[in-house]
Image (cartoon, coloured by chain):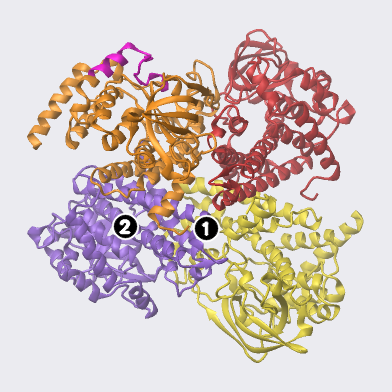
Chain colours: A yellow, B orange, C purple, D red
Amino acid sequence: MSETNLDQFRAETRAWLEANCPETMRTPMRGEKDATWGGRNPVYAHPDQKLWMDRMGARGWTVPDWPSEYGGGGLGPAETKILREEMARLKCRNPLNSFGISMLGPALLKYGTEAQKLEHLPKIARGEIRWCQGYSEPNAGSDLAGLATSADDAGDHYVVNGQKVWTSYADQADWIFCLVRTDKTSKQGGISFVLFDMASEGVSTRPILLISGYSPFCETFFDNVKVPKANRVHDENKGWDVAKYLLGHEREMISGMGLASRGEDPLIEAARKGVDPILRAQIALFQVRSQAFKAMSERFIDELKAGKAHPAQPSMMKYYGTELNKARHELQMATGGSDALEWESEASNHGAAPRAWLRTKANSIEGGTSEIQLNIIAKRILDLPS
Amino acid sequence: MSETNLDQFRAETRAWLEANCPETMRTPMRGEKDATWGGRNPVYAHPDQKLWMDRMGARGWTVPDWPSEYGGGGLGPAETKILREEMARLKCRNPLNSFGISMLGPALLKYGTEAQKLEHLPKIARGEIRWCQGYSEPNAGSDLAGLATSADDAGDHYVVNGQKVWTSYADQADWIFCLVRTDKTSKQGGISFVLFDMASEGVSTRPILLISGYSPFCETFFDNVKVPKANRVHDENKGWDVAKYLLGHEREMISGMGLASRGEDPLIEAARKGVDPILRAQIALFQVRSQAFKAMSERFIDELKAGKAHPAQPSMMKYYGTELNKARHELQMATGGSDALEWESEASNHGAAPRAWLRTKANSIEGGTSEIQLNIIAKRILDLPS
Amino acid sequence: MPLYLTDEQQMLRDTAKDFVAEHAPVSHMRALRDANDATGFSRDLWKSFAELGLTGILIPESENGLGLGQVEAGVVLEEIGRNLSPSPFLITAVAAVEALKGTPHAACWFPGILAGDTVAAIAIDEHAKHDGKIAMQAERSGNGFRLTGAKQFVAHGHVADLLLVAAATDHGTTLFAVPTDAKGLTADPQRLADASLAARLTFDGVEVDADAVVGEVDQGDGPLARLLSAGRTGASAELLGVGGGAMDRTVAYLKERKQFGQLIGSFQALQHRAAHLYSEMEVARAAVLKAQQLLDAGEDASNAVSVAKAMTGLAATLAVQEGIQMHGGIGMTDEYDIGFYMKRARVLAELFGDSNFHADALAQGAGY
Amino acid sequence: MPLYLTDEQQMLRDTAKDFVAEHAPVSHMRALRDANDATGFSRDLWKSFAELGLTGILIPESENGLGLGQVEAGVVLEEIGRNLSPSPFLITAVAAVEALKGTPHAACWFPGILAGDTVAAIAIDEHAKHDGKIAMQAERSGNGFRLTGAKQFVAHGHVADLLLVAAATDHGTTLFAVPTDAKGLTADPQRLADASLAARLTFDGVEVDADAVVGEVDQGDGPLARLLSAGRTGASAELLGVGGGAMDRTVAYLKERKQFGQLIGSFQALQHRAAHLYSEMEVARAAVLKAQQLLDAGEDASNAVSVAKAMTGLAATLAVQEGIQMHGGIGMTDEYDIGFYMKRARVLAELFGDSNFHADALAQGAGY
């Protein structure tokens, strides 16, 4: 697209967003509850969330760079960037949070059959189906090779038995993408990647109460769940390839956490109101890393799109971004003093600050611990010996 | 000794020190060159150094808690502490720096024969013989079990061949205490601890120029050096016990490094003159650890004397103290700015600050690296598995 | 005085260790939380403390207490910290007793404390950060004073019998011992992250008699300093227990959890981090004992107290952070106790000034 | 503009990499040091830089330069840093050129710079810490000014042909281009820790003409800001090379050194530290490129420049510290190059403001 056409695209985009993004969706989110997840049984803190999601979904702008035949916006990189910039300018909220968008979608685009893409991607784009991820197991932690959930061959389908843990929002999800063992003789080689409806017979979930007082994760149990083989993505026993590809996308998403959210940085706002001189120094030094990492995130995305990023670079982003986010919340707790210790009061928005702080402690654990990322960097980027 | 007698001892000690410690020996040392090492070929930056060493040596107060029959002061713990306090009060310089005092002496007191004690300890106490330590070897680094310097049995003596490295002041030392391999079939079990004169035929040294521009260490070569078996300390092949015992004493000494030297803390003095607010914060937080470690040093010495310290606690002291000392000098360099970068000028006292800073980088390497200390703490104190 | 526990102190430690672990382990705190307990601690447990004599640990023998010092109080506090036991011990038996000792208030309040009936609260903080500034006004009113203003982060403030309040008077600061049923005083208890309760207090022209003054009018800095020294040192000791408890659980977990077919405690990167943490905790322990001994010897301890509070804040924070990270996913679950350690450490780190506050105090004290 | 090097920039990098590694490797710097070289760099090497056109990298094509930007200058500086090559490039070809560009002084000085004959020096600092404060006086004197005062940390100050001096005038700061043979100007060269030379300058009533003013009288903040932005960003790029060079050598050493019968690079604790270091260096690299691109685009880059300088200071400092520690004993010897990296990093970290200075500037810029 030429410069002139891009300018025109920007003008049209701006006009459309101004006309279609409700005012309420241009205010900062007050917490996780304001996030829009869609799905069969959606929950909206405000009706404008649905309006905004539907409008964006209809244009495919929830997934602007996916092909339009799969419900995407069909935009090129330059247009996608313009859309992102214009949304930032207007402070538009994200119209749809979705593991379908950030994780499964890219994997389906790469490994899915045409039928799988046509079936699942448009529903993801429009927020009709909410997905969850079945990777971790109670005894496999960071060690996916120890995966035990079994999928026995029963002709045209598999029979799945086992247990997953840390399944994000499994109790609210409609479908799951799931790693299962189809061959017990090999470790990483015996894993397949399958999709199935959480309403299938034999699926049950149990929320896990976290130290933050919230339950974003579940234990998920499979008791003789029938999964059609047509729902397997990529070849049998090749699920590890899909999983690795998808984990890279997950890390990319999670690594954005070190950055301040759009709009004012609450840490800087607190510092402006006055903090002790040592905390001020700590915040200033944090800003150095935080702003440098912001540049790193931009560089990483640019390099990724240009195919210039080291394949293990997502590990570095995940490590650095999550550690930074933990540090940010430690500093925010310090600025808040005893106000930020209140757990239930109205004034504290029901303990938003301490709950968010505690929630960040999982950042460096979920999606591969910091230790795993450092191992990967050491081995795959620095080529250090075993 | 009763309280009254201790008070009397304090009064007498104070009077004696006031009468016998030259004024020049009550001024702060301006650098390593002001240290008194004694030996056959002593070097004194000021003649009072010799006077002060001789006077203290004659009373055995260079080693106040050694038995008087071996040249020590024969003082009990309470008197020793009083002497130390009174010396600190008068700001007396250390009369004698000596690896004989800090390392070999304690090992000889524990493992030496009566003849060895009588021969060596009094000369150490009076600063007549300067000792060096032959532990490290070029390919053995932190890994003493890989020790290769051989001592072949030749009846009443050994014939020693090999090479040591990092021998502190070997080019200025009179005698060496040295680990040699007397049995090649066992690793740590085949090592013996021997003493010999550096003037023996076949001994040669080569100073190692360090990044600080100084050469406190040497490579030391042994070419068919004859060492009488009577010079072996403890049993043959039991040198490892002596070495470990001695290393503990060395670490104890080195761990004192995290503490500011006597008198004004130069870091605080610099902070008082004005530093940027972030450096001020860093210095303040450093002071927390530095003063806490001062308490830890007191606690460690008290526990050690009472036999309450964990046998591996010297590793913790060595680790913490040396890392703290490196941090201290990083901060001092920051306070000094470009003044502290000058390497040769008169104003900078020939680069005292940057040379001292660079010197500290060896603290966490010599006498067992920080990594080795952390291994020891993990294994021997925390009992973590291999 | 050598910098380790005497045999007697060691014996007290053994007693306290067994007692607290048996009567108030972490499960006790969890049960109170799950029951949404409105008191913030168990009154029965407080009675048991009294029966052992512990509530009077700092009360002179002449007044029927144990007549012991900060070292001994710290021994108890460390076990309270290690077991995350909700208890008025720090505020009542340590900080308040230290402030009242030697004043006419002692005769009034000590018997109740000794009996395990009385609980005190301390109202100093007026902002979210402890900053040592007292702006709340106590105006002269008849024979006494009228207190107007607000305080926050007042542990046990909603159930206390006695309130120690610092307020500004004409020519300085004055410390008041205020009965909690005084008219015009309202307490709004808030559940904190660690499930403890602290109140926001509002003083709406609260009238107190002249004899509510602790020490002299305008001379409150003295008793306040004693209160804060004991409170800070005690909080440091409790933090030592919290950090130490977190570390012990974590090291134990490293020895039992397997990954990639190996005990995770055999991974060198974790070993080094655990060893570093051990070192920090040991150094913090020395700093606390130093402060306690100086206070007990009646020597100037202000620097040492700040070092102790700052260092335990740093070390315990590291302990709980490493604790959660090394536990991995299960460390994030409410079901495991390690998360409670993180929450409690945060609250104690903030109490009576955080590490930065005390580092800054050290710097100011050193003249920079 | 994507945040990576264009193909042309990548080609320049390859050229610079080969050229600097061949003509000015660390052994070149070592040889100069061992010879106690009094110039501080090799004039022949500077000529070679000129022959490649590099001395004019920022000089507009219309004035016979390469007309490139900060990104390209940084590419060269990174290789200079990686090889610890003593060179006037940063001060002369980057900072000074940027200050003189578009002024009448360009015509006077650029030809000499392009030819590799002219070397510049920059006299800003008046204290041991770069603090941005200019107190040195330039009094009106006849048609010109009389400069009195002292400057320090002036790289190449004793051999430069041109001196850019910031001084206080009646209503602001003025930047002067002073010939180094001016009467009353004395340069006292000092060997620094990294074996480079920097001068302490004394101005004893140095008379300069009015046309020595760069830009306008009292309006020196403009050219000074351009000079400092380019100098800081350039120093950041050089630090990236120093840190990167130290890291590369260290990682290589981890793959060759054995201890306890194993390559030390297989020890997980060292692997994690190396991986952390890699991450810091990558983040620093992004920060530098961001600042360079913003400067080249003519956008406000003051925050980005401070982030770059502060972040490279932190990352390179970690790189050299880990470098020495992981090399163990031999890292402490003068014979090994890794120590030179530590020394050079220290000097560059201090140049034009250290990490703390820039973190503080960020804080002030953000209004806290």
Q: Chain of mark 1?
A: C
Give the mark nearest the N terminus, 1 or 2.
2
- The numbered dot on residue A306 is none
Report how far apart the C-alphas of labels 1 and 2 lie in the structure. 34 Å
**Residue D250 occupies which quadrant of the picture?**
top right
Residue A126 as seen in the image, left or right of residue A290: right
Mark 1 element type: loop
A115 inside magenta stretch? no
> Does residue D182 show up?
yes
Q: Position of residue C357 (x, y in %)?
A: 39, 49
> Looking at the picture, which amino acid does disc 1 mark?
Phe
Residue where numbered disc 1 is placed: C267
For the point 44% across and 33% down, which residue is it?
A: B151
| Camera-side residue of D132 and B110 | B110
Q: Position of residue C115 (x, y in %)?
A: 15, 70
For the point 31% across and 57% down, which residue is it?
A: C235
Mark 2 element type: helix
Please provide the residue range marked out in magenta.
Answer: B32-55
